[in-house]
Each structure stands twice: as C-alpha cells, then as structure tokens.
Amino acid sequence: MTDKNEKNNSIPRGYKPEDTKNRLDWLKNTQGFELKDLPEDNTEELKGIIENHIGFMKIPMAIVGPASINGQYAKGKFSIPICTIEGTLAASMNRGLYATSLCGGINVKHYRQELSRAPIFIFDEISKMQDFQVWVTKNTDEIIKVAQATSRYGKILRIDQYAIQNYVILDIVLDTGNAAGQNMVTLAAKVACDYIKEKTGQNFLLESNLNSDKKASYRNIILGRGHGVIAETHLSDSVLSRILNIDPDFLNKVWHFFPIVSAMAGTHGNGIHISNALTAIYLATGQDTACVAENSVGHITMDRVADGIIFRLTLPSLTVGTVGGGTRLSLQQQNLQLLGCDNSEHSSRKLAEIIASATIGLEISLLSAIASHTWTSAHMKYGRK
C-alpha cells in the first residue's frame, strides 16, 4: 500500500549549495548519519592501493533512496551513496527505488560466495594427465590444508579439475569472507601449486584464464566470481502508471524482445545497464571498478500478475568486499558505515544485497523510460547543463 506521507520523506532536489546542505540534513534526520567532508588520506596509508601517487581526484557523489530492502543480511531502509559523472543516473536510480518502496520494497536472496584462481598444468603427453589427476584427487585434503594456512579469513571450499587437450586446470575455490579476495585466492593457489610441483615435479602457470578475472564470461554467469544475489520486487499497476509513467500491459508486451535481441547480439545476460549501477556504487565504497567487466553480467525478467508486475534480477558474479583495498580509504569507509557494512560478520554479503537492490531499481527505471518514450527527454533535462 502506498504511504501518502512517503513523498515528504523523499530526498531534497536542486543544484544550489543550500540544496546540498538540505540533503545532508535530510540524511542526518532520516538515517541518523552525519556525513562529513573528511580530509584526504595520508599518503603513507596508500601502500597496497596505488603506486606513484601524485594527488586525489574528486568525483561527484550523490545519495539515492531510501531503498526498502528485505534480505538475508540487509534488512531495513538504506540511503545509498553513488559516485558518477552521468547526469540522470542518480535521478533514475532514485525513481526506481522510490517506486519499489511504495510497494513493499525489494526482497533479496544471497545464494553463493565463491572466488577462484585457476592454475594450469601442461603435459608433454596426454597419457601423463590421468596419473596427475588421480594424484590430485587422492591428495586433495592435504593440498587444501597447505593452501588454507595462507589465510585466517578465507575458507577453501574445493578444487575442481578440468582437462582439455594436454592441459589440466585446477580451479581452486574459496569463500573469501568480507574481503573481495583477489589477492587471497592468488596466494592460496600459488602455495597449493608449489606443493603440487614439489610432490609431482609438474610445472604450472598460476592463471589459465578460466576464472575470467575482470572479463565477462559464461563461466561467471554459471559459477560466479564473488557473490551471487537475486533481487525481486512486485510493483503495482498504480505505481507503474503514476510513478514510472508506463502502461503495465504495454511494458509486459514489449519486454519480450529484450532477451531475444540480447541473444542475437551475443551479450552476456540481458541486463540493460547493470554496469552503471555497479560502477557508481563501487566508486563510492572502495571496490575494484575493473571487476565491473565480469560483474555486470545478469538476467532480468518480469512476470505480469493480476495487480502488477514482478521484476527479478540475478547478479551471479559480484566481486565486492568490505575490508582491504579501497575500502580502507576514509571517505569510502564512511560510506560503508552509512550502509552498515563496515564491521558486521557478513558485511560483504550485506553490501552485495544492497548493490543488487540498487541495480534492480535502476534497471526498472530505465526500462520504463524506454517503453514510455521519456528516455531522451530525461537525458535532455538531467544530462545537460
């Protein structure tokens, strides 16, 4: 049911300095969080983040929401910080999240957390491959024990084997806890492979390209790289018409060409602009933005029901964390605190659920803008000075 007073709680608009202050006041009053303009990080703190440092580049930051989220780890209302230089992005995401908040919010399910490194062993003769694979299978527990000693926070889940041509690929899979985990899995795989080489004499390369690190792939659609999350929201006919300016029957009818044309074009998944949402939140929360390449694969669907449309979005590969890397920077750490993702037991899973919620809001808003022929006018209004 629509809350008639909900509009009074919306984020203040405008571009003047006083409008920015009003938004900061709104954030303090509604979320109880005082966002501060913190000083730049000390250069000594940048080790492990950047080399050859010469300064800081400021990127505009906005706030969207509040998003009403009912997840396994993210529960409640969240004002989400995003960084972007694309006009209309914040307004569009905000519109989508506002529409979902009027209809009970967004249900989210975190269903997987796995990150891997996939070293490759190359053989002169294929007859040697079977003996090697049998040895690895027989000694898997000891290999995992050796690799597990490299991390207090990650957990090695399994070692998958793939044989092709005269190669054997070992996909070493970890749950990386609250870290995004790229360095964690690399170290664990290196130590495991050194142990295997010591025992078998077989040489290796540490990466085969199977895990598609920072590349879109079907592998990451199926197996993921990081967190797998599904978001779902049920928008009523009245909200679709009044807030998103779209006829629900028309939207449902025209939607069916999106998956078909996506398949024809050979895209990975059928999302519209998932990468926009991910990049904006990644910048604001200290994530590795290059991971958007593999993280932006996703599937969105809609089901027409008697009183509205149910939207679902699956993001199978979110490589995000809440400790280490860019999350150490003071402003990014403050944004994680705003989201309540700075110190909880499963804060990275909570962040992944928030990201999926923001993304489905943005996808719904753009899809509605395209179907209602307001996409161009919105960009002419918000995307220009």
Image (cartoon, rainbow, N blue to C red):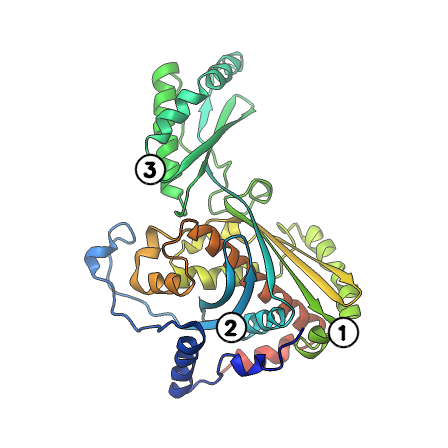
Disc 1 marks a residue whose amino acid type is Asp
- Kindly state the secondary structure of the residue where label 3 is placed: loop
Asked if disc 3 and disc 2 are in contact, CB closer than 8 Å, the reply is no
Give the alpha-carbon distance from disc 1 to disc 2, as whole Å: 24 Å
- Report the mark closest to the observer, 3 or 2: 3
Q: Residue at x 31, y 56 (%)?
A: 328
Can residue 62 be spotted in the picture?
A: yes
The residue labelled by disc 3 is: 152
243 sits left or right of 227 in the view: right
Q: Which mark is residue 247?
A: 1
In the figure, residue 56 lies in which quadrant? Answer: bottom left
Residue for point 50% across, 52% down: 293
Amino acid type indicated by mark 3: Arg
Residue 75, image x, y percentages: 52, 60
- 268 or 123: nearer the eye? 268
Q: How far apart, in angstroms, are the residues tagged by discs 3 and 2?
A: 38 Å
373 left or right of 124 in image: right
Q: In which quarter of the view is residue 112 placed?
A: top right
> What residue is drawn where x is 41% and y is 47%?
180
Q: Is label 3 or label 1 in front?
A: 3
The quarter of the picture where the N terminus appears is bottom right
**Mark 2 Cα within 10 Å, few/some/many (few <14, many 20+)?**
many
Mark carried by residue 90? 2
Q: Are marks 3 and 1 in contact (CB under 8 Å)?
A: no
